[in-house]
């Protein structure tokens, strides 16, 4: 086992009594004070997450957008400069290598932000597809730190610290200065609330973090981040997504743009080859956890919970469950096997919580 | 690190406490355990009359993000269950030693000699984490 990596803010996490745990090869804060308080801070006020473990790849040159467009299933070429686009990254057979966000920074300059656990796998995969595109492709993950400022009070806090903060729309990005340092500011996040993700040098991000602490922003750990993303039904790689499933198996058909002339996986995905249906389940009693079996009215196993928790916002158990397509019950009668007892679960079509993002 | 370990109680390596009174023990989880778990949101303990076996799981305590089994500190019969915690298990977070879970009538009192003293439990917490 190699030693765990530490972000540039490690000392800050320890100073703030963050409970440090191994995550994707990194030593990360899972919580500081309480998962509940941190989740509530993001829903009602503002919190900040150190997500510097995530990966940053840069594409620069005249084919930067075309290369990104070829790599992912969603439409990159068709989006204007300044947009952020969420997308799966698929193989030729349609299985998902990772899910990521493509940031169109300026003509000929694209940033791709990927999951920490997949940095090496993604980089090697993309590198193997790079030939023929007139652009550089660089892994700058080691050079960047990343903060996610999330919550309804994010805008005024960030505006007070930056030279400029235009009222950009959700899922937009721009480059600016923080003091003398160049930073990339995107109105994105993983909580469903309004907020910003700020990419910068380790020094720039350390000073930004310090400013957030002075301004009373609540430091939040990975546990609250996971609760918040599940409440608004955002998938997580390694849970809803993995190397064996395709976007349709995870309810991400909307990100597959068959109208694009070519992209990796287009042929395989053209038939919408779902083997599973990802459903949202909520329970009045009992807390669903990853791996718990899901059964139908006859108590036959039809699927499995991929993510589950107690929702801080609704006070109920919530889960994503992967159901075998041929076994999806028409009567929508779902039950979850929790320690050999069956708890009724209600399927919902909308996310458990509606975030306040713009 | 929590150092709230009352001297009048006995402890297990599973971070439970037991108040021994005659042949009956009152059982809860330690302050160290509640702190490690975080916000407790769900508790499942057996009904009065249930039989427990030393070292076997007898229930669970769940925080928002985790599930932890409870292990019987002794063999015996459940004679009381703390109904105050039903619907508000978070009371354990604010007062771990005031929030008992169950009372057990112990079958064989010699089993209790294996429980840790406060001093031994403190030592265990210091060395195992």
Image (cartoon, rainbow, N blue to C red):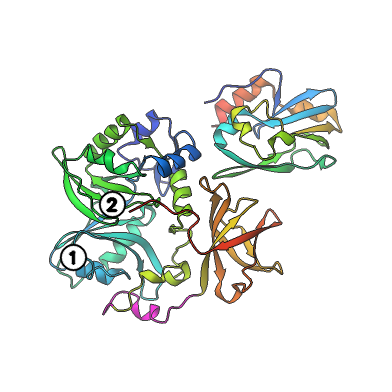
Query: Residues in magenta?
Result: A260-274
Residue at disc 1, secondary structure: helix
Residue A331 percent location from the top left of the image: 64, 72
The vertical placement of B56 against A213, above or below, is below
Which residue corresponds to the image point at 39% horizontal and 77% vertical from the top-left? A269
User: Would residue A261 be counted in the magenta stretch?
Assistant: yes
Give the spatial CA distance, label 2 vs label 1: 21 Å
> Is residue A102 found left or right of B4 in the rendered image?
left
The vertical placement of A162 against A70, above or below, is above
Q: Is residue A129 visible?
A: no
Residue at disc 2, secondary structure: loop
Q: Determine the image quadrant of residue B79.
A: top right
Which residue corresponds to the image point at 39% horizontal and 31% vertical from the top-left? A14
The vertical placement of A350 against A27, above or below, is below
Classify 10 Å Cα crowding around label 1: few (below 14), some (14-19), many (20 and above): many
Which residue corresponds to the image point at 67% horizontal and 43% vertical from the top-left? B60
Residue A266 percent location from the top left of the image: 34, 78
N-terminal of the pair, mark 2 or mark 1, is 1
Instruction: Please determine if labels 2 and 1 lie on a single subunit.
Output: yes
Classify 10 Å Cα crowding around label 2: few (below 14), some (14-19), many (20 and above): many
Residue A218 percent location from the top left of the image: 38, 35
Determine the chain carrying the residue at label 1: A
Q: Main secondary structure of the magenta part?
A: loop
> Is residue A211 found left or right of B109 in the rendered image?
left
Q: Determine the image quadrant of residue A147.
A: top left
Residue A64: mark in rendering: 1
Q: Return the residue at label 2.
A: A187
């Amino acid at each position: 086992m190699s030693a765990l990596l530490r972000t540039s803010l490690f000392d800050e996490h320890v100073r703030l009594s963050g409970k440090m745990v191994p995550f994707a090869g990194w030593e990360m804060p899972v919580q500081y004070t309480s998962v509940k308080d941190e989740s509530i801070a993001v829903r009602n006020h503002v919190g900040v997450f150190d997500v510097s473990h995530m990966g940053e790849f840069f594409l620069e040159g005249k084919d930067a957008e075309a290369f990104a467009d070829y790599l992912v299933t969603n439409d990159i070429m068709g989006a204007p400069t300044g947009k952020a686009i969420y997308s799966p990254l698929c193989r030729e057979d349609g299985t998902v290598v990772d899910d990521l966000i493509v940031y169109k920074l300026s003509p000929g300059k694209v940033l791709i932000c990927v999951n920490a656990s997949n940095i090496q796998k993604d980089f090697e995969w993309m590198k193997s597809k790079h030939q023929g595109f007139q652009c550089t492709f660089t892994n700058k993950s080691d050079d960047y730190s990343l903060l996610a400022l999330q919550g309804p009070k994010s805008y005024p806090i960030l505006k007070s610290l930056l030279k400029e903060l235009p009222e950009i729309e959700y899922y937009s990005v721009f480059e600016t200065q923080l003091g003398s340092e160049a930073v990339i500011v995107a109105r994105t996040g993983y909580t469903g609330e309004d907020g910003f993700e700020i990419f910068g040098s380790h020094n720039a991000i350390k000073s930004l973090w310090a400013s957030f602490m002075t301004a009373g922003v609540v430091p939040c750990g990975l546990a609250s981040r996971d609760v918040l993303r599940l409440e608004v039904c955002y998938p997580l790689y390694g849970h809803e997504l993995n190397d064996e499933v395709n976007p349709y198996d995870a309810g991400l058909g909307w990100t597959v743009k068959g109208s694009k002339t070519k992209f990796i996986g287009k042929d395989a995905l053209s038939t919408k080859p779902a083997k599973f249906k990802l459903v949202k389940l909520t329970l009045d009693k009992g807390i669903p956890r990853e791996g718990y079996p899901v059964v139908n009215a006859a108590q036959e196993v039809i699927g499995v919970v991929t993510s589950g928790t107690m929702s801080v916002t609704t006070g109920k158990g919530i889960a994503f469950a992967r159901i075998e397509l041929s076994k999806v019950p028409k009567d929508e009668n779902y039950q979850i096997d929790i320690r050999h007892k069956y708890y009724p679960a209600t399927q919902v079509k909308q996310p458990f919580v509606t975030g306040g993002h713009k | 690190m929590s150092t709230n370990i009352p001297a009048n109680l006995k402890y297990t390596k599973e971070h439970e406490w037991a108040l021994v009174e005659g042949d009956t023990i009152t059982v809860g989880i330690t302050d160290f355990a509640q702190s490690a778990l975080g916000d407790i949101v769900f508790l499942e303990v057996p009904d009065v009359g249930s039989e427990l076996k030393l070292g076997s799981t007898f229930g669970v305590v769940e925080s928002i993000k985790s599930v932890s089994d409870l292990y019987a500190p002794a063999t015996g019969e459940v004679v009381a269950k703390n109904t105050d915690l039903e619907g508000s298990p978070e009371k354990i977070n604010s007062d771990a030693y005031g929030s008992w879970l169950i009372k057990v009538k112990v079958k064989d009192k010699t089993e209790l000699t294996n429980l840790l003293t406060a001093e031994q439990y403190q030592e265990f917490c210091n060395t195992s984490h």
